[in-house]
Amino acid sequence: MAYDKGRLNAKQVAALAKPGHYADGKGLYLQVSKWGTKSWVFKFTLGGRTRGMGLGPIDELSLKKAREEVERLRVMVREGRDPIEERAEQRRKLKEKYDDGGKTMLFKDAIAKAHARKESEFSNEKHRKDWRSSLDTYAVPKIGDMDVAHITHQDVLRVLNQAVNEAGGTLWETKTDTATRLRGRIESVLSWATVSGYRTGDNPARWAGNLKELLPKPSKVSKVTKQPALTQADFPKWFAEMRKRDGMATRCLEFAVLCASRSGEVRGATWDEIDLEARMWKIPGARMKMERDHRVPLSDAAVALLKAVPRVSGSPYVFPAVRGGALSDMALSATMRRMQEAEVKAGRKGWLDPDSGRPAVPHGLRSTFRVWTAERGYDRDMAEMALAHCVGSAVERAYQRSDMVERRRAMMADWAAFCHGKEPAENVVPIRGAV
C-alpha cells in the first residue's frame, strides 16, 4: 500500500520520546506514554462516536504490520461493524472453546476472598476498612469485572494512572501514598488468586522488576506537605478563643492540644483508658499509628477538663457524638474552620500558618508543640515520645524501653501552662538546660 511522505517512518518510531499521540494517517497513531512505553492505537468514528482501539506495543507490532492491521479494521468500520466489540466477542468465544473447566474468578470477588483471608492481620477496624475501601474506590471501577486470570501489568497501570482531578493529575502523581498502598493491595489480591488456582504466572502488580520499570519511584513524585500550624505568639490567643466555645468537638480539640495527641487517638478515647487517680491515659497499641501502647501523663488542666466533661449513658467514649458513637474525623477540623471564619468576618486575618499562609488545622497543632519543646530546650527523645513517634533505631529501642513518662509529666504541665498563656513554674527546669 502507498503512504504519503511526511508520515511516520521506522526511525521516528524508535526515536520519539515525548509523551503524546503521533499520527501516521488513516486513524493510526503511535502512543508514547509519560513513562516512555510505546504502542499503536487505531482511532475511528462509528455512529457519531469516536473510539480508540489499542493494537499492541511496537515491539510486538511493527509499523508495517500496524498499517496493515488498520487497513483491515477500516474495512470493518465502513461496513458498520465495531472492531472493538468484535474483538471482545472473538476472545469470549475462544475462551469458551478452549476452556478446560478451570476455575474463574472476577477481581471484585477475589477482593472479598482475599480480604477475609487477611482479617487476622489487621491491627484495628480502621485498617480493615481502609484496605477494602481503596480497592473499591480505585481498582473495582477499572478492573473489577475482569477475570483475575486475564489481568496484566497494563491493567494495573490503568488503575494507578487514572486521572483523579480536573487538571488530569494521575493517582500515582497526586495521591502517591494512597497509590503505593493500593498497588500492594492489588498485588496481595492477585497473589491470593494465584495460590488459590485462579491464575498462573507472574504477579502483574509486583513492584521489583515489573512496575518499577514503568512508574517513577514514589519518592520522586510524592510531595511532603506540611500541615498548617500556629506560631508560638498566636497559640495562647488561639487557645483562649477556642476555650470560649461550647460543644463536645471543641472539648475534644482542647484535650488533643493539651495531650499533643492525634485527632483519631482522642476521638477514639474511652473512659476505661483513663485513670484519673493516676493522672494517666493509656492508649492501646491497636489504636496507635505505630501499633504499640502509648502512655500520656495528664496535666492538671487535662484532668480538670475530663472531670468537667459529661458522661453519656451507654457510650464508652470520652468525647462522644450526639448519638453516642465516636466523633467524625471532620469534627475537630470543623471547629477550627468556624474559628477561622469568625476571625475573617471580624476583619482579622485569623489563625494562619506563617509559611504557607493557610489556616491552621488540628494536626498542625502537634507541630506547634514540637517547635515549643525545641525552643524550650526539652530533650528531643522526650518530645518525640510525647508525640508517639519512633525514637532511635530498632536496636536502640530494644535496649531503651523507658517511655520517660514521669519526665514527660513535667513537660506536659509546662505545655498546658503555655497554652493558657502562663509561664512555667520557676522551679521546673528543662532537662537539657539542667545538664
Image: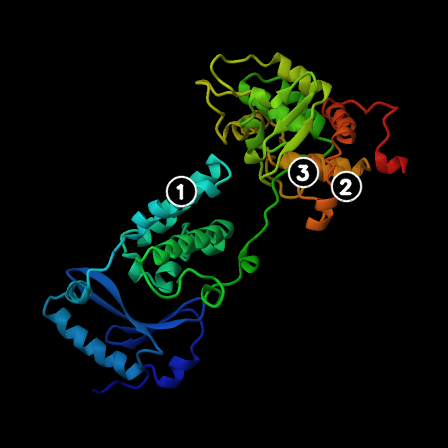
Q: Quadrant of residue 263?
A: top right
Q: How is the image coloured?
A: rainbow
Label 3 crowd (10 A; few <14 / some 14-19 / many >=20): some
Whole-angstrom CA distance, mark 3 to mark 2, is 14 Å
Secondary element under disc 2, as helix, strand or loop, is helix
Give x and y (percent) for residue 214. Answer: 45, 66
- Taking 367 as reference, is 338 left or right? left
Residue on which disc 3 sits: 367
Location of residue 359 with respect to 425 vertically, above or below: below
Q: Residue at x 31, y 81 (%)?
A: 62
In the rendered image, the quadrant that contains the N terminus is bottom left
Residue on which disc 1 sits: 133
Q: Amino acid at mark 1?
A: Ser
Give x and y (percent) for residue 242. Answer: 62, 22
Q: Residue at x 24, y 63 (%)?
A: 51
Whole-angstrom CA distance, mark 1 to mark 3, is 29 Å
Secondary element under disc 3, as helix, strand or loop, is helix
In the rendered image, the quadrant that contains the C terminus is top right
Label 2 crowd (10 A; few <14 / some 14-19 / many >=20): some
Mark 1 near mark 3, Cβ–Cβ under 8 Å? no
Q: Which mark is first along the chain, 2 or 3?
A: 3
Give x and y (percent) for residue 343. Answer: 60, 26
Q: Say which of 189 and 349 sits in front.
A: 189
Residue on which disc 2 sits: 380
Q: Amino acid at mark 3?
A: Ser
